[in-house]
Amino acid sequence: MREFFRQVARRKPLLLLPLLLLSGCSNWAIMDPQGPIGRAEKSLVFTAVILMLIVVVPVIVLTLVFAWHFRASNKKAVYRPDFHHSTTIEIIVWVVPCLIVLALGILTWKTTHALDPYKPLVAQNGEKPIEVDVIALDWKWLFVYPQLHIASVNELAMPVGASVDFRITSGTVMNAFFIPQLGTQIYAMGGMQTEVHLSADHAGIYQGLSANFSGNGFSGMTFKAIATDKAGFDAWVQKVRGSSQVLDTQSFALLSKASENVPVSYYGTVNGDIFGEQIASFVGSPPSMKTMKGNGDQASAKTTGGSNGMSGM
């Protein structure tokens, strides 16, 4: 194999250009999903590509075949300048694409509803979902665990198999919350609340990031999503609770100041509804947790500014 590449490099070096361009894509996190949402999205991508290739591949092949068959030196090719219609060809070029578009439409309809980011997941272990409030800041991520009254910066943890219910907003410009191996990018916008429900099937440390350019420190706006067993998650919670830092209105104001490449930090105590207060700073009044939980996702979006969850793959 090495000798083959040496020969190619010597005789036709341009053939190696695609490999050179792909050399920077060694970490295809989206193609290595570690959760049910990520797996479903990967399956959707592959299915859609295969359906589209049903048209693309024959067109490319037939273009080459026709060019070769009707070349000037081929005396066997029949010259038919008066040819203008073929029912068989018309059926093929219309029916096949229509069937593919129909299949893509049905697939899109089903997966759009099945992968709705607002649709809660059923935890593998049947336990209550973990709630995490996410606030995008310049240029870091704040994760508040309202059930546990703790918070962390640029690091979050979750038990393997548990459903994690993320409520997302921004304290600055628009950002996009994304953990590629778990699936579903969703936007974080000031004065609005979006949601996404994710789960990890396997223990590991997954890279999270902002997928929407937000200024000078954008490249360092990353975080770690730690999926571990129940004992490991409990240990992480105890480590966070061991921090002497308190997250309240004053400390949040300091944290909100623009800073780059921010290291992981913890808040052992959270006072007040930081998430609700942050939304209220844009729209006037904090959302009612009781109203949001009692009336469902649509009520949640209306209460917090009308966002219905802008999301992407």
Image: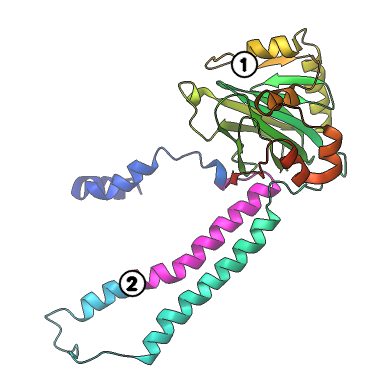
Q: Secondary structure at mark 2?
A: helix
Q: Where does label 1 land, which residue?
A: 256
Assess disc 2: are there few (<14), some (14-19) or many (≥20) residues with their C-alpha within 10 Å of its C-alpha.
few
57 part of magenta stretch? yes
- The residue sitting at 61% across, 65% down in the picture is 107
Count of all numbered marks drawn on residues in the image: 2
Q: Tell whether label 2 touches label 1 (CB within 8 Å).
A: no
Image x and y of residue 22, in percent? 39, 43
Q: Please tell me which residue lies in front, 48 or 8.
A: 48
- The residue sitting at 69% across, 14% down in the picture is 252
- The residue sitting at 40% across, 67% down in the picture is 56
Displayed quadrant of residue 187: top right
- Magenta-highlighted residues: 31-60
Above or below: residue 203 compared with residue 275:
below
Which secondary structure is most common in the magenta stretch?
A: helix
Image x and y of residue 204, in percent? 68, 34
Q: Where does label 2 land, which residue?
A: 61
* N-terminal-most mark, 1 or 2: 2
**Amino acid type, label 2:** Val
Q: Secondary structure at mark 1?
A: loop
- The residue sitting at 35% across, 72% down in the picture is 59
